[in-house]
Image (cartoon, rainbow, N blue to C red):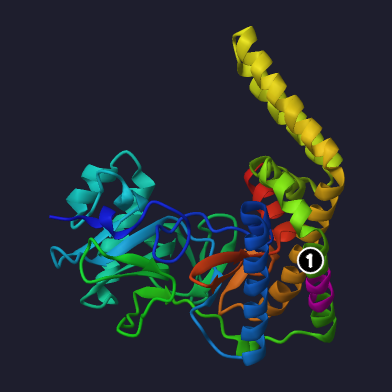
Amino acid sequence: MKNIKHFLKEQTEGEGEKLKHIEHLEDHPINDGAKGFQHAVGALQKVKQHIDMKHISPDLAMKHDGSPSIVYGHHPDTGKFFVASKSAFNKTPKINYTNADIEKNHGHAPGLVDKLKSALKHLPKISPKKGVFQGDVLYSEGDVKNEAGKVRFKPNTITYSAKENKFGLYTHTEYRGNDSASMNAHFDPDLSKFKNHSDVYHREPGHDTSKVSISPEEKEQYDHHLKSAMALHTQHGHQMYGPIEKVKDHMKSYINTTVRTGEEPSPEGLQHHLIANYGKAIDKLKTPQSKNKKSEELKGHVNHVQVNQKHFENFLKLHRHLQVAKDSLVRSLSKHTGGLDHEIAGKKVKPEGFVINHEGRPTKLNDRHEFNKMNFLARNP
């Protein structure tokens, strides 16, 4: 019998493949150079189009700070309802039809056991008789506070308030195909056959852009920074992306560091980042040969950044323009919270962010300098 591990291809985060880490929009050019830049621009333009159209589409969804991500539905080979964590995609998958299965497969993780048991208890109340889906658990009975007819829950960093129910889930993915071997991930799930039940708070994809608007200031900022990014791409792209490709993993790590520290990214800062990270790695090595090899690798990277400093400067400007253009749209989208209140440490904040599905590929849209920094500080007080 085929199992759920065959549903997905072990490749990227694109549609029809395994749902993995979703990238920030402005990081696409780091990953894929000119092709990544074009995808980022297309995604931005699609978000703007959704705002202008003032409608609801599963291609544009509010991102929820849920945990864990679960796969659930009626298994196509057995017809029985199941729940699973991401270990559904292991070489030896863990599929749970009963509480006993959950204890056997996940007994080492009590918190996960409680979530999966709650999902197994409540999700059949709303799920259709066919189909396999994936979603993020917002809350279960053991981790909510009931206040004035609402539940308050904190799956990760954000504290949410929503109408009172026993289990909350945000479904964002559907697996389609004629059998388990051919099923692939799609980010526009058909949830029309789901039922309503008073025990389950079920969030569906699709952000209602009829309830948002882009101000003249936000539109001007979006237009200016998108135009500036496109000009840099046109003028320098043929020289710029090659040098970035050689250190792209270090570049992404450095960008994340600057988000936390508030530092303005620069070629000099990237060099300091390389020296600090390689220094830690070299200190852990035991033999002179391995230390020398790592040191030479560091020298090569630092020299590469120095020689191509102008290209790195232009790329970081492009990255910044994409980020600011995106932020203007995120501010517009955040004017509608989808019926949820959002707080961090008692302070009201915008939603975590949004996800746009462009050309079958999901892209993350969030204000990194607000949410990501607060997320980091909340976890490292």
User: What is the x, y in percent for residue 201?
Assistant: 41, 74
**Measuring 44% from the left and 77% from the top, which residue is drawn there?**
204
Against 43, residue 1 (above or below) is: above
**Measuring 36% from the left and 59% from the top, which residue is drawn there?**
70
Q: Is residue 93 left or right of residue 233?
A: left
**Measuring 83% from the left and 75% from the top, which residue is drawn there?**
221
Which quadrant of the figure contains the C terminus?
top right
Q: Please tell me whether residue 226 belongs to the stretch shown in magenta.
A: yes
Instruction: Say whether residue 292 is visible.
Output: yes
Q: Please tell me whether residue 246 belongs to the stretch shown in magenta.
A: no
Residues drawn in magenta = 222-229
Using the image as rendered, state which of residue 112 and residue 131 is in the foreground: 131
Badge 1 is on which residue? 234
Three-letter amino acid code of the residue under disc 1: Thr
User: What is the x, y in percent for residue 249?
Assistant: 64, 42
Against 311, residue 185 (above or below) is: below
